[in-house]
Image (spheres, helix red, strand yellow):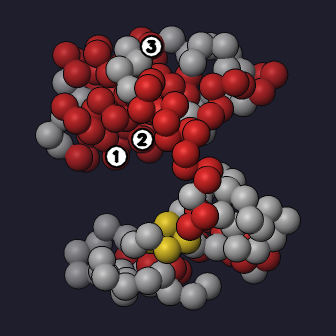
Amino acid sequence: MSFLNRFSSDQYSYRVSSGIAYIASYDNDPKHLLQFINSIFSERFQPEEGDGYQATPNKALIDLAEDAGVANKIANEAFNLHYVKWQEVINENTPEEKALWNVSGSNKGAMTTPTVTINGKLVDLNAASEKQMDPLEAILKSLGIDKEHVGKSGHMPKVTYKSKPLDL
């Protein structure tokens, strides 16, 4: 979703989410996209929201994509707002999806971010917060894998593509 555009002066959310869609469509190596997404959310890169926002030039996004392994030709085209109409439909309709509404907490019955689903089932991040769990801990517990085992050969989540998330 790109609803945070209202907090930037340069359509940052549209450019980044359009870039993600473009890279996913035109780069055949999913590791490049995952690395790019990790990079845009890193503390060293993610811009401040609200009054402290400073414009982020396309060049910075292109460099980040190329550092993630995205080819220059794809990176140079990725942030040219090819998917704005699609994003507008997503922004309008996604908050209305009841399956994404909070099931507990002060925002019960409304969608907030972050929203995490596993196999179409909502992970209750409000319940996680009440248990002093950060979102990553909650996601990993819901998947049934310890943080130190993520990405390690021989260690798989307990949740399969057919099962629901584990209880927190």
The residue sitting at 28% across, 32% down in the picture is: 23
Residue 8 screen position, x and y as percent: 67, 20
Q: Earlier in the sequence, mark 3 or mark 2?
A: 2
Question: Disc 1 vs disc 2: Cβ atoms closer than 8 Å?
Answer: yes
Residue 96 visible in the snapshot: yes
Q: How many marks?
A: 3
Q: Quadrant of residue 50?
A: top right
Q: In the shown orientation, is residue 3 left or right of residue 36?
A: right
Q: Amino acid at mark 3?
A: Asn
Q: Please, which residue is most extreme toward the left here?
A: 28
Q: Residues within 10 Å of mark 3 (few under 14, many from 20)?
A: some
Q: Secondary structure at mark 2?
A: helix
Q: What's the distance in space between the residues labelled 3 and 2, CA to CA?
A: 15 Å
Residue 134 visible in the snapshot: no
User: Which residue is at the front of the view, 14 or 139?
Assistant: 14
State the mark number for residue 34.
1
**Residue 120, above or below 113:** below
Q: In the shown orientation, is residue 117 left or right of residue 64?
A: right
Q: What's the distance in space between the residues labelled 3 and 1, CA to CA?
A: 19 Å
* Residue for badge 3: 58
The residue sitting at 72% across, 59% down in the picture is: 110
Q: Amino acid at mark 1?
A: Leu
The residue sitting at 62% across, 50% down in the picture is: 95
Q: Amino acid at mark 2?
A: Ile
Q: Secondary structure at mark 1?
A: helix
Q: What's the distance in space between the residues labelled 1 and 2, CA to CA?
A: 5 Å
Residue 120 screen position, x and y as percent: 44, 70
* Residue for badge 2: 37
Q: In the shown orientation, is residue 105 left or right of residue 152?
A: right
**Residue 64, above or below 93:** above
